[in-house]
Every structure is written in C-alpha cells, then in structure tokens.
Image (tube, rainbow, N blue to C red):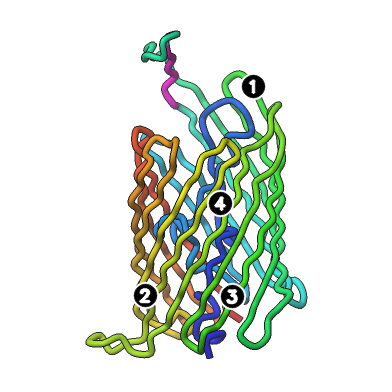
Amino acid sequence: MWNKAMGRLTACLLILMPGIVHAANVGSGYGESLLVMTTARQAGTGGLALEDPWRQGTQVELGSILMSPGLRWFGLAGQGGIGPGLRGTAEVFTYQSPGSPRTSEMSDGSYGGGSGTVGVGEWAGRGTLLWTFISEGVWRAAVLGRATGLMQRLPDEANVGGALDAGCQAQYLVDTRRALTVWGLVGPLGYGGGRMSVWRVTAGTGWLERIETVPILGRPGGYGAGIEGEGLGEGLLHYGLGALCWLGSPSGEGMTVFLRTGLRFMSGSAQEVQPRGGAGVLWSFSERLGMQFDYAVAPMGALGTCNYATLGVRMLK
C-alpha cells in the first residue's frame, strides 16, 4: 500500500514541517530576519518540500546553511507523535557572523568603503503542531500552526520578537502508487524590532509516483514534481518549480539515493532566477531505524552561494 511504502515520502508539506526553516538578513530590524530558509531536501527542489509530509515515528535533524563569504546558520529539530492524529516539532537555531566586513555607501548609493568588521548573532526557537483531521480512504487532510520567537543582536541594537504561521494540506491517493497534493501557508506574521515582520501567502501542488521496478536498474524507485507560487506583503511574486527521483525503497531496508533539481524565480532579489540542485542518501538499517544525509546548492547572485546540509536520524516506528 502507498501509506506503507511511501509513508515518509508522499505528498508535499510545503509548510516546512520538520527541519530547520529560518533565515536572517544582516540588516537592522527583526522583520527581515523571518524570511524562510529550508532543509537541503527542500532547497534542492527549487524550494518545494516534496519529501516531508505525513511523517510517522520520531525524527531528529541537524541542519547547516553556509553562505559565502562566511555566513552560517545552524539548527536542531526533533518531531514525533503526541496524540491521535497530532504531531509536534520543536526547533532551535542560531545564526552567527562574528567578523563580517563593515561597509558603507555614499548618498548616491555608490560604495563608500570599508571600516573594520562587525559581529551579528541571532538565537531562535519554534514550536509546530500538525493535526491530521482526515485520514481514511483516498483522502488525507491536515492543518498546521507554528509559533516562533527570536532574539537578534546587531552592532548598534538588540531586537526581540515573535511570529505565527498557519497552513493546510490535502492529499488524494490516485492509486497505491500515485498521490496528488495541494497545500497553502500564510505567514510568518509577527512583530519585533519596532516593525512588523515580513509575510507571505504560499499555494502549490505536487505529484509523487512510486515505481515497483526501475527499467534496466532492476530496483524500486520513483519520481516527483511540483509547482508553487508566493505572494509577498511588499507586492512581489515568487515562483518555484521542482523535481526529484530516487532509487531504492525509502520505507524498506538498505540504501536509497535521491537526485533533486529545481528553479526559483524571486523578483526583487539579488538573483531573480535561481537554478538549484542537490542529492541525498538514506541508509535504512532496519524498518525501524535509518539515517539520512542531504546536500543542496543555490546561487544568490551578489550575495554569494548557499550550501545546504541536513543530517537526520529517523526512528520510523
């Protein structure tokens, strides 16, 4: 059945449920610090989380995002079931840049030179609840709520703030091997540092299909693809396209290899068209225990290149 063979790799939870999902801008103001970053799995498919829905069992993940030159995010997340149809996720994460060059600009916007270095740091925590209120027959539906708190230390000020997100997702099982999902998310909505945080409305759809035996290779596998759109509070529109394929059985024993690719169009950003890609390996030591490592790369134009890495331990039952 699909639910057994694809329980950890079914529809598209683009409400970022497990994993480290924080980013920060090295500017002044808490609001800019709630722009969303992702796990390596999601980054590799153009920002679409095609692999993280309806998770079961318990997972612990360590995430790292490195942006040249020298900007680093680190995070730790854990999730598990806490009641009938209810799952919880707890996350902590930090951003540190102890020696970034201090630069200035002239009144006409031209480069004004450098003057030493500055230190910037952030510490945050997040709690998430996902309630699956329909799970029978060919339909599954869930709602999500998430609260985030953040403390930001800048060279000339310190900010504290919070934000809320809300989302939903629904899955239709076409048959035992194929599933179609739609999703939506509003947030983060919050206040801190003397201003409202950034906010967005996200909606999309995705498709996943499991293949019993991949031709020539003679092993099980599958593929997926999706598309989403984002409307930002400042009036900008962002779009994402993503696809992945895998070789192996994610819910069985042995090794499963993932390949990912995607494209992100982000109007108003340093690089508006961002091709992305990545790969991952899942080692399932038994039906109950597995370890997964994922890597992805995303260009950010003049800001440099983001390198994503996520390491997780999955206790499946």
Compare marks 2 and 1 and give the one earlier in the sequence: 1
Instruction: Look at label 3 and name its amino acid.
Output: Gln
Q: Nearer the viewer, residue 22 or 107?
A: 107
Secondary structure beneath label 3: strand
Residue 228 in percent (x, y) is at 49, 58
Q: Nearer the viewer, mark 1 or mark 4?
A: 4
Q: Residues within 10 Å of mark 3 (few under 14, many from 20)?
A: many
Q: Which residue is mark 4?
A: 21
Q: Nearer the viewer, residue 119 or 111?
A: 111
Q: Residue at x 50, y 86 (%)?
A: 5
Residue range in magenta is: 100-105
Q: Which residue is mark 1?
A: 157
Residue 171: which disc?
3
Residue 74 in percent (x, y) is at 52, 47
Residue 160 in percent (x, y) is at 70, 33
Instruction: Look at label 1 and name its amino acid.
Output: Glu
- Are dots 3 and 4 in contact, CB under 8 Å? no
Residue at the far right in the pictured view: 83
Alpha carbon distance from label 3 to label 4: 23 Å
Secondary structure beneath label 2: strand
Compare marks 3 and 1 and give the one earlier in the sequence: 1
Compare marks 2 and 4 and give the one earlier in the sequence: 4
